[in-house]
Amino acid sequence: MVKKDISYLKQKNLLHMENIYKIYDGKVVLNDIDLSVSKGELCTVVGPSGCGKSTLLRLILGQERPDKGEIFIEGKPVGFASKDRGIVYQKYSLFPHLSVIENVIIGKKFTAGLFAKKQVFIEEGMEYLKRVRLDAHYNKYPHELSGGMQQRVAIAQSLIMKPKILLMDEPFGALDPGTREDIQVFLLELWEDIKMNIFFVTHDLEEAVFLGTRIIVLSQFYTDGLPNDQNTPKGAKIVADHALERIAASTTVKKSIKNRELIEQIKLDGFSPEYLQRISEFNLRHPDSFQTI
């Protein structure tokens, strides 16, 4: 790749990760991750099981620290977890004994001062429930809602904290196919409305290509060309980084030839142990892609 002015990317983009390594018990999980993301992107993250997708989210969230490298948000080093980064998990983060509106505003109540008025939070929470089309269900409890509705409450619960980045870790994985497709469309409508930065981890390549403005492929299947390379454990790198057209008006685009071809290319680049790209040949087509090596 052509070497870029990395300092310019750090100042220009919302999120900038440079030369990131993460090691557990002596094993490298993430190996030299370089990633820069501009404001308003909906990034989908895919890769083989166990390659470190959730680890990447935890580093951005601030739950964990890299063993090497730096992470910046708006040009400033990332600290520990804070309300400027929200997260939605596959398992709904709802309290069963609280109503929908109480679940939505619980983060605001925890971070507010002693003299904050609950009614103000309730009014704000209702506005977010309108955004996720659940305001009519504000006084119900989680067990009274469908899986898709519960996940929309969890999204409202994160949005009310006004994070700069919303992280989503397999958020639709537990939903049935019909509900999953409905909530995919809902997420796109919501993103187009608020243009928040979203990082969306999924194992479903069709979902990733449909949702994203950018798709990032993590994989441990590559070669650095050194002797015995195939027998040497290695952490995952970003082996492909594609800019995607945000033109999906309906789910029928999932079956387009262009999408099918891209999915097959991603399978080859990131999911095939038999097809090992050299580091210098990674499919990094996004304009903000860079490598520090």
Image (tube, rainbow, N blue to C red):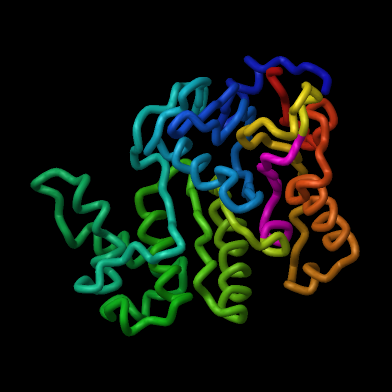
Give the answer, above or below, for where 234 lies relative to 76: below
Q: Position of residue 34 (x, y in %)?
A: 64, 28
Identify the residue shown where x is 25% and y is 64%: 122
Residue segment shown in magenta: 208-222
Residue 219 position in % (x across, y down)? 68, 42
Residue pictured at 9% horizontal, 47% vertical:
115
Is the residue 254 above or below the residue 117 in the image?
Answer: below
Q: Residue furthest right?
A: 257
Q: Residue furthest left?
A: 114
Does 249 sit left or right of 27 as displayed? Answer: right
Task: For the N terminus, give its image quadrant.
Answer: top right
Q: Tell me how many marks there are.
A: 0
Q: Residue furthest bottom?
A: 144
* Residue drawn at (71%, 23%) of the image: 291
Residue 35, given in percent of the width and then of the height, sits at: 63, 31
Who's the residue at 73% across and 57% down the image? 209
Does the stretch in magenta take in 52? no
